[in-house]
Image (tube, rainbow, N blue to C red):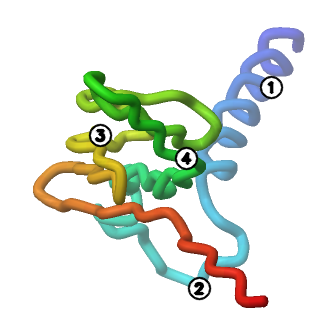
């Protein structure tokens, strides 16, 4: 009696796991395709850093403040590499793409 009860419980538990793998809201006879079951991870997207300031002193290399962090040429920030800094703009590179960040020129008229 106990053997039959334990055997039936084992069968119910084993069958329950196979039922849990099915989507109850899916149409009858529907099967997952190989591409849906093996979803590719999305490429990570980084936001372009914000240029806060450019500081250039005589006889030294210019530095920039991007996202409130001081950076020099060659530094990586959020997946972007600082390629060049001059008094007018900062050049960022990622892969084969290039971005030129400029400060907003504020001209106040009186």
Q: Which one is in front, 108 or 72? A: 108
- According to the picture, the residue beneath numbered tag 1 turns out to be 9
Whether residue 88 can be seen here: yes
Which of discs 1 and 3 lies nearer the camera? The answer is 3
- According to the picture, the residue beneath numbered tag 2 turns out to be 27
The answer to the question of whether label 4 and label 3 lie on touching residues, with beta carbons closer than 8 A, is no
Vertical position of residue 45 compared to residue 28: above or below: above
User: Residue 31 placed where, x, y %?
Assistant: 42, 71
The answer to the question of whether label 1 and label 2 lie on touching residues, with beta carbons closer than 8 A, is no
Q: Which one is in front, 57 or 36? A: 57
Is residue 98 toward the left or the right of residue 66 in the image? left
- According to the picture, the residue beneath numbered tag 4 turns out to be 53
Label 2 – label 4 distance at C-alpha: 58 Å
User: Residue 72 placed where, x, y %?
Assistant: 35, 28
Of the residues under marks 1 and 2, which one precedes in the sequence?
1
Disc 1 element? helix
Q: Residue at x 85, y 20 (%)?
A: 5
Vertical position of residue 81 compared to residue 69: above or below: below
Of the residues under marks 1 and 3, which one precedes in the sequence?
1
Is residue 25 toward the left or the right of residue 52 in the image? right
Of the residues under marks 4 and 3, which one precedes in the sequence?
4
Of the residues under marks 4 and 1, which one precedes in the sequence?
1
Which of discs 2 and 3 lies nearer the camera? The answer is 3
User: Residue 30 placed where, x, y %?
Assistant: 47, 79
Of the residues under marks 2 and 3, which one precedes in the sequence?
2
């Amino acid at each position: 009696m106990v053997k039959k009860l334990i055997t039936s419980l084992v069968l119910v538990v084993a069958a329950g796991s196979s039922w849990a793998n099915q989507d109850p809201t899916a149409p009858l006879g529907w099967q997952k395709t190989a591409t849906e079951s093996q979803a590719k991870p999305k490429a990570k997207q980084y936001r372009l850093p914000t240029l806060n300031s450019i500081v250039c002193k005589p006889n030294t290399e210019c530095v920039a403040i991007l996202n409130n962090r001081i950076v020099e040429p060659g530094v990586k920030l959020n997946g972007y590499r600082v390629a060049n800094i001059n008094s007018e703009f900062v050049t960022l590179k990622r892969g084969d793409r290039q971005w030129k960040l400029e400060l907003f020129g504020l001209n106040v008229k009186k």
